Image (cartoon, rainbow, N blue to C red):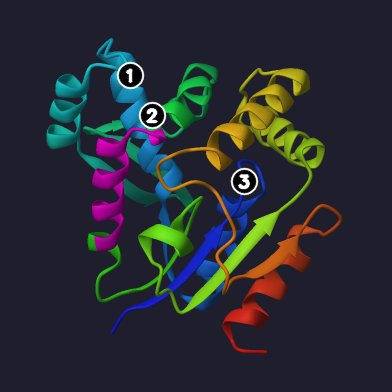
Amino acid sequence: MSFVVAIDGPAGSGKGTITKLVGEELGLVYIDTGALYRCVTLSMIKNNVGLEESEKIKEILNTINIEFKKEENKDSVYLNGEDVTKQIREKEVNELVSQVSHLIQVRENITNLSRNIAEGKKVIMEGRDIGTNVFPNADVKIYLDATAEERARRRLKQNQEKGIDISYEEILKNIIFRDNNDKTSSVAPLKQAEDSVYIDSSDMTIEEVKNEIINIIRGG
């Protein structure tokens, strides 16, 4: 029997980190939908496929192979057999992924893939439309938010730890652009589901956010 926890929110709100931690503590399967979109974006870049080339994009979607692996206590992402964990977080992908995720054919493909992965499992999944579109009947829905400035600071720290060189100003600009893009999208826009719990994590530690979400899931 399936059990789905849906965590939505804007880019850089800490969804990925928190979802992973909560999943590990509660034994839920963590599905990184953002990484799925980033893999499609990276594949388009590698194959010089533009946003308007729908037939070539369709070909990529029909042949792409994405795997999530746990290696030495680290989550790795493989695209067609290649470890792309770092590549999918680099500047070129960051600047294009929001636009790729707005393409109807890409969104439908990833939505179906996410549902198939979750079938019959206890999962926790994060994104921008998990509780509103992918799993509208999710057992638990949370909308995780934070100010754009705080999200940029967090992303800068993450990038520094991974050896990715992007300035705070560039990150903030990208986050503001993505917020506008995601909220005004004609395809599954970012918005809070009516039956979700809102959490503003701007002044909260990772531990505090994790514990609050675990408490919500456990019905406390």
Residue pointed to by mark 3: 10
Establish if 63 lies above or below 173: below
Going by the numbered disc 2, the residue's amino acid type is Val
Image coords of residue 199 (percent x, y): 72, 64
Mark 3: secondary structure:
loop
Going by the numbered disc 1, the residue's amino acid type is Leu
Q: Quadrant of residue 138?
A: bottom left
Q: Which is more N-terminal, label 2 or label 3? A: 3
Residue pointed to by mark 2: 100
Q: Which is more N-terminal, label 1 or label 3? A: 3
Q: Report the side of 74 relative to 191 (left or right).
A: left
Report if the CB atoms under discs 2 and 1 are less than 8 Å apart.
yes
Image coords of residue 54 (percent x, y): 20, 23
Residue pointed to by mark 1: 51
In-front residue for pair 135/168: 135
Quadrant (top left/top right/bottom left/bottom right) for the N terminus: bottom left
Q: Is residue 148 magenta?
A: no
Q: Report the side of 17 relative to 116 (left or right).
A: right
Q: Report the side of 187 relative to 170 (left or right).
A: left
Going by the numbered disc 3, the residue's amino acid type is Pro
Image coords of residue 9 (percent x, y): 60, 52
Q: Quadrant of residue 161?
A: top right
For marks 3 and 2, give the CA distance: 16 Å
In-front residue for pair 139/74: 139
Q: Residue at x 30, y 15 (%)?
A: 46
Q: Report the side of 15 relative to 146 (left or right).
A: left
